[in-house]
Image (tube, rainbow, N blue to C red):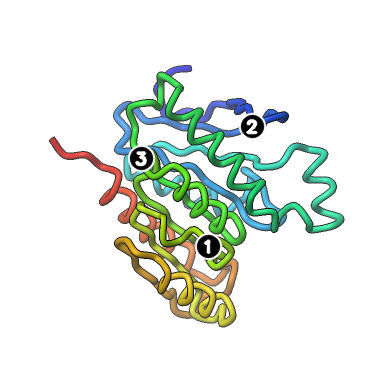
């Protein structure tokens, strides 16, 4: 695997399954951001890919993961059961974090986690379990409340981004913010609903995330 910004397909072993991911690494990355998709989504999520492109333009590497196998995606599309299995999702993110740490191409890069919807809860659980490896977390329209039991153990600076019209999720994020004991911030994007489909709102998310990751993942010497 070459250290270029070209997208490469990678495979990550997670217990008894193998997951696919799309890895992009610039020549001298300021850090690498692992994406945890939300309910009913995958590494092909257009919203996450938009944010990933903005992060790469800021000098960050990205790894967008499929957290389910094809069979599991098929089951979840019918039952919506697996998308709320935070223990399962977090375990697979932890496997991806360990893969990044062990891979010679990415081993020297600090790791950030970007979680959307239920993926945000899983990202925070993974951050709590890998405090030495995860340097920052960003949640987009996320459910950090699903990680309430572990939030006090999270050591990574955490940014929660919520749409100003996403009323129930605003409350969930405020509750989670109260439990976090590290550097933290809640940004409410005016005029945005849950999926940030309104003009300019996803761009705002991407800029907020880029600045947060660059601030906390870049090591100055």
**How many C-alpha atoms fall within 10 Å of the one at disc 1: few (<14), some, or many (≥20)?**
few
**How many C-alpha atoms fall within 10 Å of the one at disc 3: few (<14), some, or many (≥20)?**
few
Earlier residue among tags 2 and 3: 2
- Would you identify the image quadrant in which residue 153 lies? bottom left
What label does residue 149 carry, if any?
Answer: 1
- Would you identify the image quadrant in which residue 33 lies? top left
From the image, tell me which residue sits under label 3. Answer: 132
Q: Closest to the observer: 48 or 86?
A: 86
Cα gap from disc 1 to disc 2, whole angstroms: 23 Å
Mark toward the viewer: 1 or 2: 1
Q: Is residue 133 above or below residue 41?
A: above
Cα gap from disc 3 to disc 1, whole angstroms: 19 Å
- Residue occupying image coordinates x 39% and y 65%: 180
Where is residue 147 drawn, in percent x and y? 54, 61
Horizontally, residue 34 falls left or right of residue 72, namely left
Where is residue 152 drawn, in percent x and y? 41, 61
**How many C-alpha atoms fall within 10 Å of the one at disc 2: few (<14), some, or many (≥20)?**
some
Q: Closest to the observer: 12 or 40?
A: 12
> Is disc 1 in contact with disc 2, using a CB cutoff of under 8 Å?
no
> Is disc 2 in contact with disc 3, using a CB cutoff of under 8 Å?
no
From the image, tell me which residue sits under label 2. Answer: 14
Q: Tag 2's secondary structure? A: strand
């Amino acid at each position: 695997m070459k250290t270029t910004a070209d997208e490469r397909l990678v495979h990550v072993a997670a217990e008894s399954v193998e997951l696919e991911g799309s890895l992009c690494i610039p020549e001298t990355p300021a850090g690498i951001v692992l994406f945890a998709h939300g309910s009913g989504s995958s590494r092909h999520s257009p919203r996450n890919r938009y944010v990933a492109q903005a992060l790469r333009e800021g000098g960050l590497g990205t790894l967008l993961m499929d957290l389910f196998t094809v069979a599991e995606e098929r089951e979840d599309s019918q039952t919506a059961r697996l998308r709320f299995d935070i223990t399962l999702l977090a375990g697979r993110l932890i496997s991806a974090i360990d893969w990044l740490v062990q891979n010679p191409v990415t081993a020297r890069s600090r790791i950030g986690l970007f979680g959307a919807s239920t993926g945000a809860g899983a990202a925070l659980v993974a951050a709590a379990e890998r405090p030495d490896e995860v340097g920052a977390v960003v949640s987009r329209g996320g459910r950090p409340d699903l990680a309430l039991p572990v939030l006090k153990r999270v050591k990574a600076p955490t940014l929660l981004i919520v749409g100003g019209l996403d009323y129930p999720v605003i409350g969930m994020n405020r509750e989670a913010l109260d439990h976090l004991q590290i550097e933290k911030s809640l940004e409410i994007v005016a005029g945005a609903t849950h999926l940030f489909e309104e003009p300019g709102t996803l761009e705002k998310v991407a800029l907020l995330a880029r600045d947060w990751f660059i601030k906390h993942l870049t090591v100055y010497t």
